[in-house]
Each structure stands twice: as structure tokens, then as C-alpha cells.
Image (tube, rainbow, N blue to C red):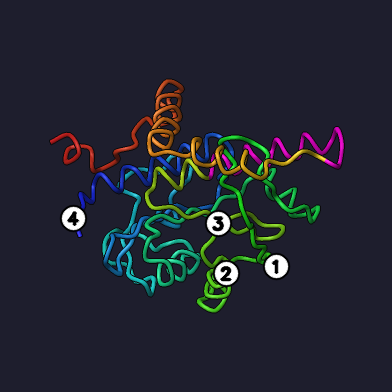
Amino acid sequence: MGIVDKNVVKLDVAKAVRMLEKIGLLDMNGHVSYRIAGTDQFFINSRKASRASVTAADIVMCDMDGRLLEGDSEPPSEYHIHTEIFKRRSEVLCVIHNHPHYQTVLGIADVAMKPVFGIGSFVKNVPVYEKSSLVNTAEMGAELAELLGDEVTIQLRHHGTVTVGESVKAAFAKSIFLEENAKKQYDAMLLRHDIRVLNGENLVRTRDTAWQPSIIQKVWTYHEEKALKEGALIGIEGDLQEELLQ
């Protein structure tokens, strides 16, 4: 395991939360976590922090039982979503629980999400977790994680989604394009129910060419620069500003 700069991680998590809130994938609820590779420790935005004004200082560190290790506030009540996935997926370092509009609407209509958009073509199987209440127990978190299996995302019927990735930036980018894919599928189905879906060799090539590390960084940079331009990241460093500038 390499050395992890905790302040940089906290800043990335806080940025992800603010940027997801700015584009409507998070609202007053939702959370982003980052697990330190090879450990049982993870960072997550605190329960009390507003998603619109969260700072790096609002990112707390916990163990896999949700016990606070660093920070001055408790984790969100749904931290079990994150811990139970981390326990089962060693390659997953980031978990994001979103409340996206179009993915949730497709779920309410019982319409399976399909790969219909180039950069969203990584969509494969999207399991559906049928319990719509808060996932605030270890038992429910374990059920959700087992159902997710090796997939990228899972839908919580009438509630939201959970998306995983190998980094904060990767999970962020996946969150963006899962919703964009769902939006395009929804709009296309307004025109005709029997829509054209990516498949065969075309799907394979599209997946291979459209999802690269450079694209992940490009997505992050675009949203970060847009958020900076619109003033959505003002004060993001919080009390960590002096340390982050050293």
C-alpha cells in the first residue's frame, strides 16, 4: 500500500460531494466514501455536513464498524452501504450513494437500464434492491452488497443508486454517465418504446474506446473547472486550508 495523503483524499471526497450536488445527483442526502487500500479504514462525508457546503474538514475517517477514528461528527446513518461493499470488493476504493432522477424514474417504471449512449456503454447488468427505506443496518447493507456482486452499480427502488469505482474520480465519472445514459434512454422511449440499444461488436468496441483513464480525468477536470467558475467550490478546504497549501 502506498502512502496516502489524507488531506488530498478528504479534499477529493468533498469536491465529489459538492459537484454531485451541484448537478443534482445528490441533494440534502447522499454520500461519497474512499477506503484506504489494504486497510479497514475509510473516509466519508459526515452526517451533519450540508452536501452543498461540505468542506475537507467535514470528511471523517471510520473503521468497518462505523466507529469514528478521525473527525468531530458521526458518519451518515447509511454507512453500512459502504462498509459492506468494501468488505466484499477489495478492488473497490470508492462508493457513492446518489439520488439521481432518471435512473430512479426508470426503476419506478420497472424499466431495465440498457447501454444506449457511447460513454455510458459500460452499463451491463443493473441489479435492483427492493427495500426503499434507509439502508441503516448491517443486515440491509450486506443484502445490498451481495446483490451488487461484481457489478458497477445497483438501483435502490424508489430511492436512488449506489455506484462503485477504483478511485473517487472513477466512481464520480461513472455516476455522471450512468445518469446521462438513463436520461437518453428515457427520452428515446418517449419517442418509441422499441429503442435501439448498443450490442454486439459495436458495443464491445464502444466500451473499449470510450472508457479510458484519460476520460475519467477529463470528466473530473470538466466538472471541477465548471464548479470553480460558478463558485461552487468556495471554501472547500475548510479548516484544512493551511495544511493543504503547505
Residue that appears at 34% across and 43% down: 12
Q: Is residue 77 left or right of residue 120?
A: left
Q: Which residues are magenta?
A: 175-194
- Give the amino acid type for the residue marked by disc 2 in the picture: Leu
Chain-order first, disc 4 or disc 2: 4
**What SS does tag 3 mark?**
strand
Q: For the residues marked 2 and 1, what is the alpha-carbon distance in whole angstroms?
A: 9 Å
Residue that appears at 37% across and 61% down: 91
- Give the amino acid type for the residue marked by disc 4 in the picture: Gly
**What SS does tag 2 mark?**
helix
Q: Nearest to the eye among marks 1 and 4: give it.
A: 4
Chain-order first, disc 2 or disc 1: 1
Which quadrant would the C terminus be assigned to in this image?
A: top left
| Magenta segment, prevailing SS (helix, strand or loop) | helix
- Give the amino acid type for the residue marked by disc 3 in the picture: Val
The quarter of the picture where residue 234 lies is top left
- Give the amino acid type for the residue marked by disc 1 in the picture: Glu
Q: Which residue, given by chain and number where applicable, does mark 4 sit on? A: 2
Q: Which residue, given by chain and number where applicable, does mark 1 sit on? A: 130
Q: Is residue 163 left or right of residue 198?
A: left
Q: Are marks 1 and 3 in contact (CB under 8 Å)?
A: no
Asked if 131 appears above or below 11 in the picture, the reply is: below
**What SS does tag 4 mark?**
loop
Nearer-the-camera pick, 71 or 176: 176
Asked if 138 appears above or below 130 in the picture, the reply is: below
| Label at residue 162 | 3
Residue that appears at 41% across and 62% down: 75
Chain-order first, disc 1 or disc 4: 4
| Label at residue 144 | 2
Q: Is residue 131 left or right of residue 108?
A: left
Nearer-the-camera pick, 161 or 153: 153
